[in-house]
């Protein structure tokens, strides 16, 4: 989208116009002599005697009378409107045009113009001073002032579009929590660079396909639409337009993602997920309006809520857990109960606010705080010279420290509803004082106040509830006294760091040996795993993906193993998804080799997808689409799922997506030590491993030991390779329980990567025909 505008520089413009007017007016007023020749032929010769004769003045310069203008001296009066009576020594009495009052009027004109200019300067200075005062008080910002005096020329068809889940039930528009938070944030931004579409869902629809497991070995976790937890909204109160569409009328790419999702109009690119979508909108808004006040929401170096919820404790809290708490509190009715338990996530946030903020530039921020709060110059200088560890701890002012970010906006929208509901039944100030302090401080923000109408109908429905008169007992849940920062040292105990003690590893290996788990390698499904790189255009090579030369040969060998497996299981017309695509190393080779197949590149990092997009455009590939989202938010239908070195839980998420779609999978795992339970996955993966009474800590010990794969001379390498086989066998056993034929393949050459496993699975032929 492009925005053309006329910049508002009021004071310089007024001064410029004033000087132009002065110049034009001064040129339009000329002396009488400059215009005399034009009238000489029309003036009586007798009245020109003053030119060649001496003369005396008989009276002052006077305005011409009506008779003089029409009969006596019409030509002279037409020149200036004034005449003067004279006495020529030879010709006698005569009249001449006079210019004395013309110059007097010009002087008056200059005085008038000077006065106007002075008034303009005074008005401009007064406006500037008033603006600075309002801005210092936080009641005005440069963006809004600029927008009031700009003339935008927008092509709405060029705007990217945000698709949100919603529905009209009995004439009222209802939306889930994710949509409510997104609309609240857009209203906070006031003028987001995005079009908004509300997608109508049927009551029985679900956000993700949820196929029944082929056996009881795995219970898939899916996000179904729960209309009991939807919130009423009034779209008329919003500063942006909202279009309502049926799900069937939306573009196909939107069907690949859970909503909220953004579809770019200029290219086949989709962004999905609450935090990812809102970050995209903020970045696009700043591209159009660089002075927009929402810049601060992106946080330090634009990194606020950048990590996905599968690996980030903070993103998970904002995007998943708080929204779940919001739905539960909004749905619950406390009228017929004697006890009410404070939501765990509210208490977690209270403990988070009790901890000092973890700052990226802690020394600088503490020194700034000292300069602003310590008034004694000597004490101020003494404190600023101390080392970071010697300075006092700061307190949370906002969710992530000292600056307001997108996390505050997202959390506030949920907490505003939660606190409003809970305050009907309990007094919260004594229970969660820091949360209430943060809540009241955020409530005073003028932009937050402007966004509150989005929540008004929901709050009105809550206000209908009344206290029963009975005092309810408040139950305070027990939660760990730790912040929500992943890097909080209190979150990690020494015993959780000792995963690789040899005695622990041997104990776990003994349990698996007793259970007769003896994994072996299978053969690669392709007869030839080599690719003819010399026949490919240069943009197909991973070197074009900005890969260092030191890794290029090994990366090519890894790609040959993965791509040849894909070629062996795919068929024309298949949809192939490259999960955790990065710069498109796998997907681009596949798309070029299989022009009859569609390839989707799914990646959370925009910078990586942009590198892939550049290569796709160079190759002019028309069968590639880009999906920027976390794995959890992809729900498109596909035939083959692929991942090369998807770290930790990402491999299991990719396999889960493939199992849900009954699609073939080719996965190369990585970072086994990163395996850990989350809101989607449990470990061990297979029922067989669970039946061994293998504890979670023992399983994680196995994962950490699997990362001890070094060179062949290292004594830990053989043990690490065995642990890799045991973890991957667990993964494949899950697939086998769901009707898959599987293979555990060792990449060739095995030195192409320390993580050289390839997990391959296809649904059994007899089950495939039943789909």
Image (tube, grey):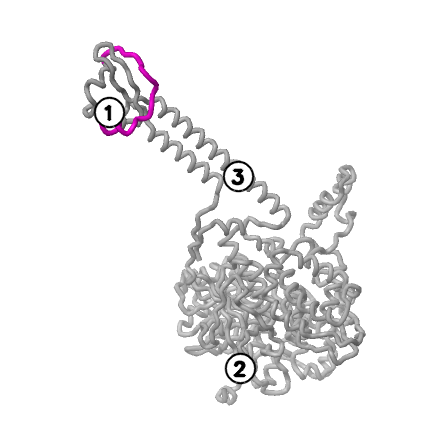
Foreground mark, 2 or 3, reads: 3
Residue 412 is left or right of residue 758, and the answer is: right
Q: Which residue is mark 2?
A: 662
Q: Which mark is residue 712?
A: none
Bin the neighbour count of mark 2 within 10 Å (Cα to Cα): few under 14, some 14-19, many 20 and up. many
Q: Nearer the viewer, residue 663 or 469?
A: 469
- The residues bearing labels 1 and 2 have C-alpha atoms spaced at a distance of 108 Å
Q: Which mark is residue 123?
A: 3
- The residues bearing labels 2 and 3 have C-alpha atoms spaced at a distance of 72 Å
Residue 672 pos. (x, y %): 65, 69
Q: Which residue is mark 1?
A: 73
Report which quarter residue 680 is drawn in.
bottom right
Q: Nearer the viewer, residue 342 or 605?
A: 342
- Asked if one can make out residue 580 in the rendered structure from this viewpoint, the answer is no
Bin the neighbour count of mark 3 within 10 Å (Cα to Cα): few under 14, some 14-19, many 20 and up. few
Where the N terminus falls, by quadrant? bottom left
Identify which residue is drawn at 70% across, 50% down.
362
Residue 144 pos. (x, y %): 54, 52
Q: Which residues are magenta?
A: 52-73
**First in sequence: mark 2 or mark 3?**
3
**First in sequence: mark 1 or mark 2?**
1
- Asked if one can make out residue 673 in the rendered structure from this viewpoint, the answer is yes
Foreground mark, 1 or 3, reads: 1
Report which quarter residue 294 is drawn in.
bottom right
- The residues bearing labels 1 and 3 have C-alpha atoms spaced at a distance of 48 Å
| 66 lies above or below 622 | above
Q: In the rendered structure, are the residues bearing label 1 and label 3 in contact, judged by CB atoms less than 8 Å apart?
A: no
Q: Nearer the viewer, residue 306 or 469?
A: 469
Q: Secondary structure at mark 3?
A: helix
**First in sequence: mark 1 or mark 3?**
1
Identify which residue is drawn at 77% across, 70% down.
426
């Amino acid at each position: 989208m492009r925005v053309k505008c006329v910049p508002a520089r009021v004071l310089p413009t007024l001064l410029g116009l004033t000087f132009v007017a002065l110049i034009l007016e001064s040129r339009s007023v000329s002396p009488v002599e400059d215009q005399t020749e034009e009238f000489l032929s029309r003036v009586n010769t007798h009245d020109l005697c003053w030119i060649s004769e001496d003369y005396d003045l008989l009276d002052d310069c006077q305005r011409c009378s009506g008779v003089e203008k029409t009969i006596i001296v019409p030509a002279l009066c037409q020149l200036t409107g004034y005449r003067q009576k004279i006495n020529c020594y030879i010709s006698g009495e005569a009249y001449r045009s006079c210019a004395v009052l013309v110059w007097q009027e010009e002087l008056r004109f200059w005085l008038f113009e000077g006065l106007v200019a002075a008034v303009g300067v005074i008005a401009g200075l007064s406006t500037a001073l008033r603006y600075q005062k309002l801005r210092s008080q936080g009641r005005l910002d440069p963006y809004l002032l600029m927008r009031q005096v700009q003339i935008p020329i927008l092509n709405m068809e060029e705007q990217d579009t945000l698709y949100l889940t919603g529905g009209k039930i009995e004439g009222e528009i209802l939306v889930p929590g994710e949509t409510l938070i997104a609309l609240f944030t857009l209203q906070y931004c006031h003028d987001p660079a995005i079009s908004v579409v509300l997608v109508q869902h049927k009551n029985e629809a679900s956000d993700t396909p949820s196929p029944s497991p082929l056996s009881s070995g795995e219970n898939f976790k899916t996000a179904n639409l729960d209309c009991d937890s939807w919130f009423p909204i009034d779209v008329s109160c919003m500063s942006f337009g909202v279009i309502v569409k049926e799900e069937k009328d939306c573009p196909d790419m939107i069907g690949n993602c859970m909503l909220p999702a953004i579809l770019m109009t200029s290219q086949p690119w989709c962004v999905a997920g609450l935090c990812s979508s809102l970050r995209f909108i903020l970045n696009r808004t700043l591209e159009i309006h660089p002075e927009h006040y929402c810049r601060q929401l992106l946080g330090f170096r634009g990194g606020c809520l950048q990590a996905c919820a599968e690996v980030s404790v903070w993103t998970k809290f904002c995007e998943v857990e708080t929204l779940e708490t919001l739905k539960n509190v909004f749905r619950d009715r406390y009228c017929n109960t004697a006890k009410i338990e404070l939501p765990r996530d509210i208490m977690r946030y209270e403990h988070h606010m009790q901890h000092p903020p973890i700052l990226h530039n802690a020394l600088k921020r503490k020194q700034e705080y000292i300069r602003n709060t310590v008034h004694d110059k000597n004490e101020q200088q003494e404190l600023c010279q101390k080392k970071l560890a010697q300075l006092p701890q700061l307190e949370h002012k906002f969710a992530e420290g000292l600056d307001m970010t997108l996390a505050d906006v997202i959390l506030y929208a949920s907490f505003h509803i939660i606190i409003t509901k809970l305050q009907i039944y309990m007094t919260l100030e004594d229970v969660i004082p820091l949360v209430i302090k943060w809540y009241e401080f955020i409530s005073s923000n003028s932009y937050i106040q402007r966004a509150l109408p989005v929540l008004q109908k929901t709050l009105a429905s809550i206000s209908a509830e009344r206290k029963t008169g009975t005092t309810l007992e408040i139950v305070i849940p027990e939660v760990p006294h730790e912040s929500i920062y992943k890097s909080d040292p209190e979150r990690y105990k020494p015993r959780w760091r000792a995963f690789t003690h040899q005695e622990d590893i041997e104990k776990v290996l003994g349990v698996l040996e007793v259970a007769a788990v003896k994994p072996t390698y299978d053969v690669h499904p392709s007869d030839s795993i080599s690719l003819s790189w010399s026949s490919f255009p240069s943009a197909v090579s991973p070197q074009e993906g900005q890969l260092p030369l030191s890794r290029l040969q090994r990366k090519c060998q890894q790609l040959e193993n993965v791509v040849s497996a894909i070629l062996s299981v795919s068929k024309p017309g298949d949809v192939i998804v490259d999960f955790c695509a990065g710069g498109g190393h796998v997907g681009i080779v596949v798309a070029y080799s299989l022009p009859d197949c569609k390839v989707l590149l799914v990646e959370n990092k925009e910078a990586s997808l942009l590198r892939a997009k550049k290569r796709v455009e160079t190759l002019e590939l028309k069968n590639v689409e880009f999906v920027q989202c976390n794995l959890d938010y992809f729900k498109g239908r596909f035939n083959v799922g692929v991942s090369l070195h998807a770290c930790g839980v990402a491999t299991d998420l990719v396999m889960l997506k493939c199992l849900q779609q009954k699609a073939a999978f080719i996965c190369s795992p990585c970072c086994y030590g990163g395996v850990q339970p989350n809101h989607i996955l449990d470990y061990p993966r297979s029922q067989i491993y669970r039946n061994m009474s293998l504890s979670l800590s023992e399983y994680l010990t196995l994962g950490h030991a699997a990362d001890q794969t070094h060179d062949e001379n290292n004594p830990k390498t053989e043990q690490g390779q065995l642990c890799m086989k045991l973890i991957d066998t667990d993964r494949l056993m899950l697939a086998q329980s769901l009707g898959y034929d599987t293979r555990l393949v060792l990449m060739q050459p095995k030195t192409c990567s320390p993580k050289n496993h390839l997990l391959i699975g296809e649904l059994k032929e007899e089950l495939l025909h039943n789909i």
